[in-house]
Image (cartoon, rainbow, N blue to C red):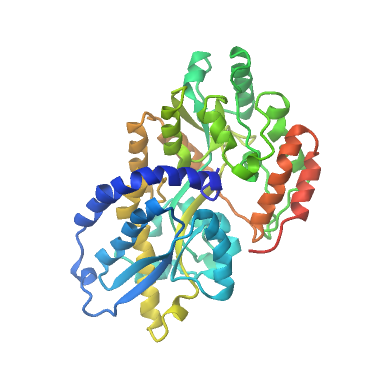
Amino acid sequence: MRPGRQKSRDARQRLRSKLAAIAATTALAATVTSTALPASQASAATNTPVTLSWEMWVSPSTIPFWEHDASLVHSMYPWITVKLTEEPSYSDYWVRLPVQISSNTEPDLVATQNLRTSSYQAGFLPVSTSQLNSEGTSGFSLSAFDQGAVNGYKVSGGRLIALPYDFGPLLMFYNKTVFEKYHIPLPSNNWTWPQFYKDIATIQKKSDGAIYGYADDPFFDEFLTFATDMGGHYLTPGGALKVNTPQFANLLKEYVAPVKNGLAPLPPSTASVTGSWDLQQWESGAAATYIDGPWDLLPDIAAVKAGIEHFQIGLAPLPNGPSGKSSTLLSGSGFGISKDLYKNHPGVNKAQLLSDAIKAIEVMTGPKFEKANAASGDFPARTADFPYFYHTLSTLGITNAASPMDYALKDAVPYNATNKWAGTEDAFNSQIVGVMQGSIKPMSALTYTEDNQGTPA
C-alpha cells in the first residue's frame, strides 16, 4: 500500500530500473544545465569543503538516478559534496538502520519514512523551521510542501527529522473497462462504501463469476486505512497501539466481508509474505478493484499493457466513510540529518557543518529534483510539482488523476506508528488470512497483534 511496503518499493524499483538511464540523461540533466546560481551560493572561496556521506535504499540500476540527486547539491554549493556511500536494498536498509543508530555508525544523511518517525527519531538531528529558513537555500519555505507530507516527520516542539521528497494517499484502483462494460457508473469522489459493495457484487454477478469485484489485501496497512476511513483510531493519544477493541473487531469483520461473501478471492497463506498478491490479481484482470498508492501507478500501467487484458485504468479516492469524507493514511519518504554528523567530522565547526547538511537535504528534496522524480513515478512532496506527475500519467492514458488525488489528500492523515511496528505488522499479517478463512476470530487476531508487537526498533 504505502511506500514503506515491500511490494510497492519493489514495483517502483522495477519501473525506475527502466527509467533511470533516461531520466539521468534528459530531465535530470536539464535541471543542472538550466540552473542559474546566485554568486553567493556558487562561490566556494569562503567555505570549507565538506563531503557528506549519504545512505539510501537502491537497486543497481537506480544508483545513477540518486547520484544525480546528490550532484545537484554540489552544483549549487560547490564546497559541499554528497556521496552515496551506503546502497543497501530496501529490505536490507531497515535491518541495517537500527543497528547503525544504536552503534553510532550512521552516515551523515539518511533516508527515512514518515511511518518510522517514532521508531527511528533517535537517529536524527531534529531541525526547526527557523534553522531551515536561515541555514538553507535562499527562499526555502516549508509552505512549498504538502503539509500532510511534512507533518509525518514532526517530533516534539514541532521540529522535523526529515524533509519529504515523495508521499501519497491510498486510492482505489479500478478496471475502467469492466465498469463500462457492465454499465456501472464510474467511481467518483462521492463514492461510499455501501455503493462500493454494491458495485463489486454487480461485477461478480454480471461476469458470471469470471471476475471478482475486489482483491482484498491481507495486509495491516490496508486494514488500518480502511479502519481510519471508518472513523477508527489505532493509536492511543499517548502513541500506543490499541486495536483489540469491539470497535476494531467489527471493523476487521467488515474488512474481510468481501472474501467471506465471495466478492473477493481468498488469498493464499503466503500472500502477506510476498506482498504483491492483490496487485497481481488486479493487473491480470481477475479482480476489478484493489487499494494501492500512487507509487504503483506506473508499474501497474506497464504491467497491464504487457498483459492479456489491456484494460483501461481508473482511479478513485477510497469510498467516503461515515463522516462523509475519504480519510486515508498518508505515507512518504524523505531525507534527514544523522545524529552522528558531528562525530563523523571531528574538528569541523559544528554550526557550519549543520548549515551545510541543511542545505544538502533542501536541495535533494528541492524542485529541480522533484520534477524529474515525479516524471519517474514518485508523487512529489512539493505541491507545485504535482502537475509533472499528472502529466506523466496523462501521456500513459490516465487523464483523471488530479481530481481523486486532490480529494484524497484533503482529509488524509499521516500514517503514524509505534517503535515496534515491524513486529506489529508481522503479527497481524500472520493472522489475517485465517480471519478471512474463518478459522481465526477477528478479536483473537487483534489481541494476538497487540500481544506480539515485538521489540522496539
What residue lies at 68% left-to-right and 44% top-to-bottom? Answer: 232
Residue lying furthest front: 60
In the image, residue 27 lies at what x, y percent? 26, 48
* Res 444 quadrant in image: top right
* Res 282 quadrant in image: top right
Compared across the picture, whether 438 is left or right of 304 comes to right
Compared across the picture, whether 370 is left or right of 182 comes to left
* Residue 133 in view, yes or no: no
Total of numbered circles in the picture? Answer: 0
* Res 270 quadrant in image: top right
In the image, residue 130 lies at what x, y percent? 41, 69
- Image quadrant containing the N terminus: top right
In the image, residue 53 lies at what x, y percent? 40, 70
Against 196, is 161 above or below? below
Residue lying furthest bottom: 347
In depth, the one of 200 and 396 nearer the eye is 396
What residue lies at 34% left-to-right and 73% top-to-bottom? Answer: 51
- Image quadrant containing the C terminus: bottom right
What residue lies at 76% left-to-right and 46% top-to-bottom? Answer: 446
In the image, residue 22 lies at what x, y percent? 29, 45
What residue lies at 71% left-to-right and 38% top-to-bottom? Answer: 433
In depth, the one of 58 and 138 nearer the eye is 58
* Residue 123 in view, yes or no: yes
Against 426, is 87 above or below? below
